[in-house]
Amino acid sequence: MIADVFFMDLEVNSRENLPQKLSRLVKTAGIENVLTKNDLTAVKIHFGERGNTAYIRPVFIRKIIQTIKEYKARPFLTDANTLYVGTRSNSVAHIHTAIENGFSYSSMDSTPIIIADGLMGKSETKISIDQKNCQHVYIGSEIINADTLISVAHFKGHELTGFGGTLKNIGMGCASRRGKLDMHSNVSPKIKRKTCIGCAECEKHCPAGAISLEEKKAYIDKNKCIGCGECIIRCPTQSVNINWNQTIPVFLEKMMEYNLGVLKNKEKKAFFINFITDISPKCDCLSYSESPIVNNVGILAATDPVAIDQASADLVNQQKGLPGTVLQTNLAAGQDKFRGLYPSVDWEHQLDYARKIGLGTREYNLVKLKTLSYKK
């Protein structure tokens, strides 16, 4: 089975601007087929951490919302609270951050923000999936209660998954706090004492209080550790490491199983959009964003979550790496940029496993949207 993935580049002219071209893309890709009048439509996005600038620009999200409303559906913006310490770990802070980053009620065409897993990340629905790693998954209730799901993901690199796109936006992004903990539970960080400088950044940001300084070096209490990976992101000397070969494949599989739970009651009621722009090397959960590793590519839309991520990865890897960024290897066009960033992460494993459990296909047909010609 081959899935159609619709692609638009960022070339425009006076006849059609970028938001207008985006609307034409999602219509061409068949967004109307998943929408019914009065559908409560969850638009799952990442609002960006405070201080981050790589997340999707609000003007594009506004246009997607307006397009949804053309079909008389009722959209709301949503995300689930984070496991790590940051500015989105509870609904109050989460909504404040969203507004600060440009996602206000007025700027989003009078569309509300509803955090999927409630005030403290505990409003969840238990979904039975009976898979290899998870018998049940825990999803933010408002995602489950919605009639339709529209995923809008920023495609970029990621420390634990190689890249983050649709599958991460859904699998990790829609899980409640218990669900996120369930996925991370096999990720066991350890400290490389030789390079640890005792700065206590990891201790300060650990949500479980599992890290302390002993003899001016960080120490992780494995009995308290919840495996969220916050210490990995925060360490300035890269002294926090993971047993990648044993733990990451299981983590990736669990995330795919959570996708299965999210989409279980959304058959023919889900639609996926990937923005391959500002392709930062790390997650938008950081309070900063590093230089993009390749030039902007474009935007994709599809009804297959596996195919759209496969196409996005392929398009990024076809680009030349930009000099002067954290990407130091695999800079040539056609080389694997995500392996260049994270050599120990087999990012393809998530796609293979997603295909195995029936989430979609890695085979796709890229349908390119033509730029409208100038009027004569």
Image (cartoon, rainbow, N blue to C red):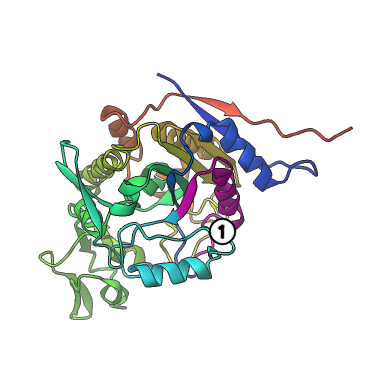
Q: Based on the displayed image, in which of its 4 quarters is residue 13 positioned? A: top right
Q: Which residues are magenta?
A: 51-76
Total labels: the figure holds 1
Q: Residues within 10 Å of mark 1 (few under 14, many from 20)?
A: many
- Residue ranking furthest to the top: 1
Q: Based on the displayed image, in which of its 4 quarters is residue 336 positioned? A: top left
Could you tell me which residue is drawn at 36 percent across and 67 percent down?
91
- Residue ranking furthest to the left: 223
For the N terminus, the image quarter is: top left
Between 24 and 34, the one lying in front of the other is 34
Find numbered disc 1 in the image and state the secondary structure of the residue it sits on.
loop
Q: Is residue 9 left or right of residue 110?
A: right
- Residue ranking furthest to the right: 376
Observer able to see residue 52: yes
- Does 74 appear above or below 333? below
Between 355 and 205, the one lying in front of the other is 355
- Is residue 13 rendered magenta in the image? no
Image spot of residue 2 (x, y percent): 44, 20
Q: Based on the displayed image, in which of its 4 quarters is residue 241 positioned? A: bottom left
Could you tell me which residue is drawn at 36 percent across and 29 percent down?
360
Image spot of residue 27 (x, y percent): 58, 35
Residue that badge 1 annotates: 108
Observer able to see residue 321: no
Between 54 and 188, the one lying in front of the other is 54
Image spot of residue 155 (x, y percent): 48, 47
Image spot of residue 69 (x, y percent): 56, 46
- Residue ranking furthest to the bottom: 215
Between 70 and 291, the one lying in front of the other is 70
The amino acid type of the residue labelled 1 equals Met
- Is residue 65 rendered magenta in the image? yes
For the C terminus, the image quarter is: top right
